[in-house]
Image (spheres, rainbow, N blue to C red):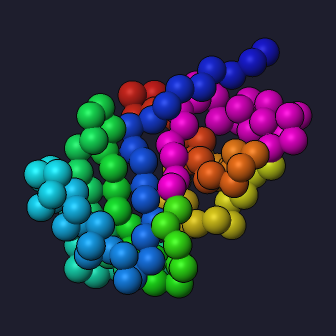
Amino acid sequence: MTPTFSGGHNIAMKLPKAQFDRTIAFYRDILGMEVTDESSEAVANGVARSASVRFGPVKLWFDRVDNYARADLWLELFTDDVGLATRHLAAHGIAVQDELEPLPSGLDAHWISSPVGIPHIVRLSDEVQ
């Protein structure tokens, strides 16, 4: 049996402290997108601040990660069965990497990385949970 996969609703751009404000200003002031969900304090372990914009059908998150030296892109991947998906990915040499960032308590999900190192959260869609 093979699990199904589809793109999620969230993309996270992990940004170094020095690039966070300029990046927010680019999307808000130059592109004219409405920045929402702004926080001025830590929102997750390692994420000092966060904000987002609607980017077509997805929400693009900007997470300030103070120990980063360069920007990084993180993607959300939905599946119909996290356990089956995890086994399927492992059979193809894609290991779970939950050490990348702590997951919320009770969330049925795992972190993986694509062959070029782009982190993906593999989880049930909001409609399935």
75 magenta-colored: yes
Q: Can I make out residue 22 in this image? A: yes
Task: Report the residue at 78% width, 15% height from top.
Answer: 1
Q: Is residue 36 shown in magenta? A: no
Where in the figure is residue 60, as x and y percent of width and height? Answer: 33, 50
Res 99 → quadrant = bottom right
Q: Which corner quadrant of the image does residue 28 belong to?
A: bottom left
98 is higher (above) or lower (below) than 43: above
Q: State left or right for residue 118 relative to residue 89.
A: left
- The residue range painted magenta reads 73-94
Question: Residue at point 74% right, 38% down?
Answer: 86
Judge whether 79 appears above or below 114 on screen: above
Q: Quadrant of residue 103?
A: bottom right
Residue 109 horizontal side relative to residue 126, left or right: right
Q: Residue at x 43, y 70 (%)?
A: 15
Residue sticking out furthest to the top: 1
Q: Quick one: 28 or 79, which is closer to the camera? A: 28
Rendering coords of residue 104 (x, y %): 49, 60
Q: Position of residue 57 (x, y in %)?
A: 29, 32
